[in-house]
Image: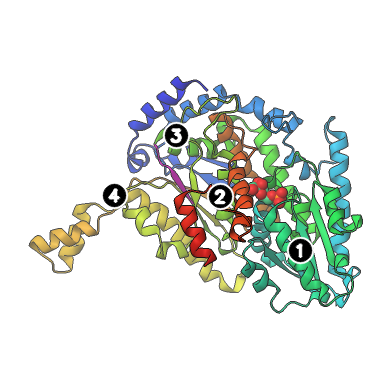
């Protein structure tokens, strides 16, 4: 996109108004600056975006070719240019019975593997597939990054639908992760799923081999209780996993976009194939909305434009994701990978330097916990942190409905407090009512001032069902896509993770004393000496 458009965005953002004033001047602001998709509502009225700035942001999306690039992605064009791959994770959740022409082979492959997954998941859940000690009681998914965060986040999110065996997730190469997970499990009734797109990731392969050794101590044929999910099927057979328990997928599914396919096997075993299908249907519903709605009515596009406004326009470098839904407690970590691995790049698709800041730092925790930890800084710190609240209309715990009312009240209270704040006069009045006077009143009042005018958005959904979770994840995927298109980034590669991997491989023999550290810098040599001592 032309530099002039970014310059203009910054110019517009520099004169942004006071949010509360926007509401005073326009009693339909909430309706104008919100959008629905099915029963989901995205409210971005508590931001400093005006009619004019929104029009400008939409014109930027148009200029960046968001719609044509979106269509290119869905059609299977090789838009991941630096890896020369198509980007078709959306096909994994496309359940259309009479799909449009094109991509027939890919669709057929996806549908075959989905059927194979459902048969296996059902067999595990029913006990038809058993361990050497009887019915499977525990499933361990060993994977990392996209091969862990998606199923781990979604399995927790869908706990009320979990009626299969217990499911555990091991990702960290720190032996503590595996050891703590294995503690108390019976190897003879445990199924291990090795989930790795490449089947080379050092953490996953190390954990998988150690889990294999753990199982070997008890059962005669450990490999029989292993399944694999990967694009590298030959490597799975080298590991000793029978091809009937290998679930493949293609390189056009990026790791962080892979929960919809075989990487979601652990989730499918937990909640069953029907609930898993509902999850896919939710994602597909968001795809249809993304493809059909105009830019101005398009939820993922508007979410992206709010992100661009705050980060590249206003210069707010971070974004807090604050789900008022305890079962979404892994969502911030999931979105960290989705957004930061996708758009954390300083080189544009054509190799030129990025004209503006790359994607934001994404972080967060569920409410209300975060309120008692870091919200202090969000309300009174010197930096502005745009907040993205999310909350369900209804919880699953019918007998604890009063909890849900409190949860919702807290969520709404936070966005209100961020916007309206509390002036020095108001704080002084409160202090005066407590009997304070003079210098003491002035000082104490200043500590109780909230600047306000801090932006937030709120995503409201009916209830955290598999369908709704699918919608939410697809919403964020497309948001990242739109932001990436506007920045001119390839959102589907991740070269930035490679250097650390290479250096870790080179350091392992040095740490083990097999190679010299002479070529290393002084700090690394000192740390190595300390750690080897
Ligand atoms: O190192 C980053 C990464 O490649 C992620 O993109 C990916 O999700 C993760 O590692 C795991 O990779 P794999 O599924 O190939 O083990």
For numbered disc 3, what is the local secondary structure?
helix
Judge from the rendering whether residue 504 lies leftward or rightward of residue 21; answer left or right: right
For numbered disc 2, what is the local secondary structure?
helix
Judging by the rendered image, the residue that carries numbered circle 2 is 336
Classify mark 4 as within 8 Å of ligand 1 or not, answering yes or no: no
| Range of residues picked out in magenta | 315-320
Residue 336 falls inside the magenta stretch: no
Judging by the rendered image, the residue that carries numbered circle 3 is 312
Residue beneath the point at 89% across and 70% down? 221
For numbered disc 4, what is the local secondary structure?
loop
How far apart are labels 3 and 1 at the CA level?
A: 45 Å
Which mark identifies residue 451? 4
Establish if 261 lies above or below 121: above
Residue 343 is situated, as x and y percent measured from the top left of the image, at: 56, 38
How far apart are labels 1 and 2 at the CA level?
A: 28 Å
Judge from the rendering whether residue 421 lies leftward or rightward of residue 100; answer left or right: left
Nearer the camera: disc 4 or disc 1 = 1
Residue 317 falls inside the magenta stretch: yes
Residue 36 is situated, as x and y percent measured from the top left of the image, at: 58, 43
Q: Nearer the viewer, residue 307 or 33?
A: 307
């Amino acid at each position: 996109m032309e530099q002039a458009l970014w310059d203009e965005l910054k110019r517009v953002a520099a004169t942004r108004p006071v949010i509360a004033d926007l509401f005073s001047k326009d009693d339909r602001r909430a309706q104008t600056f919100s959008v629905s998709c099915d029963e989901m509502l995205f409210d971005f009225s508590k931001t400093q975006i005006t009619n004019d700035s929104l029009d400008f942001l939409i014109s930027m999306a148009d200029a960046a070719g968001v719609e044509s690039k979106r269509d290119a992605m869905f059609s299977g064009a090789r838009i991941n240019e630096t890896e020369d791959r198509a980007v078709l994770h959306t096909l994994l959740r496309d359940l259309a019975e009479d799909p449009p022409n094109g991509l027939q082979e890919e669709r057929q492959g996806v549908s075959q593997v989905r059927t194979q997954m459902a048969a296996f998941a059902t067999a595990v859940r029913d006990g038809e597939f058993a361990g050497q000690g009887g019915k499977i009681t525990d499933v361990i998914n060993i994977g990392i990054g996209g091969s862990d965060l998606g199923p781990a986040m979604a399995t927790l999110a869908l706990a009320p639908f979990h009626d299969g065996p217990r499911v555990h997730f091991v990702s960290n190469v720190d032996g503590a992760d595996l050891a703590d997970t294995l503690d108390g499990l019976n190897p003879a009734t445990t199924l291990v799923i090795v989930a790795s797109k490449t089947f080379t990731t050092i953490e996953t392969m190390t954990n998988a081999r150690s889990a294999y050794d753990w199982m070997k101590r008890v059962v005669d044929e450990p490999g029989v209780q292993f399944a694999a999910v990967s694009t590298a099927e030959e490597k799975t057979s080298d590991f000793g996993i029978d091809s009937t328990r290998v679930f493949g997928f293609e390189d056009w599914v990026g790791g962080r976009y892979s929960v919809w396919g075989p990487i979601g096997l652990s989730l499918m075993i937990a909640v069953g194939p029907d609930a898993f299908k509902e999850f896919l249907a939710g994602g597909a519903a968001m795809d249809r909305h993304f493809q059909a709605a105009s830019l101005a009515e398009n939820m993922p596009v508007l979410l992206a434009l709010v992100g661009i406004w705050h980060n590249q326009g206003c210069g707010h470098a971070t974004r807090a994701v604050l789900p008022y839904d305890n079962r979404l407690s892994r969502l911030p970590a999931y979105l960290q990978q989705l957004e930061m691995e996708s758009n954390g790049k300083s080189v544009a698709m054509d190799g030129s330097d990025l004209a503006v800041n790359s994607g934001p730092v994404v972080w967060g925790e569920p409410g209300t916990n975060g309120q008692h930890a870091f919200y202090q800084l969000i309300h009174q710190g010197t930096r502005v942190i745009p907040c993205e609240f999310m909350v369900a209309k209804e919880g699953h715990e019918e007998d604890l409905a009063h909890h849900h009312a409190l949860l919702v009240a807290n969520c709404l209270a936070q966005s209100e407090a961020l916007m309206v704040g509390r002036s020095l006069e108001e704080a002084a009045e409160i202090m005066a009512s407590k009997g304070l006077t003079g210098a003491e009143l002035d000082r104490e009042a200043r500590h109780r001032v909230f600047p306000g005018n801090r932006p937030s958005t709120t995503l409201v959904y009916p209830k955290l069902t598999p369908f709704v979770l699918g919608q939410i994840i697809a919403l964020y995927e497309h948001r990242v896509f739109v932001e990436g298109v506007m920045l001119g980034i390839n959102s589907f590669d991740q070269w930035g993770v490679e250097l650390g991997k290479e250096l870790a491989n080179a350091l392992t023999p040095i740490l083990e004393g097999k190679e010299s550290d002479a070529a290393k810098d002084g700090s690394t040599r000192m740390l190595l000496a300390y750690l080897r001592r």
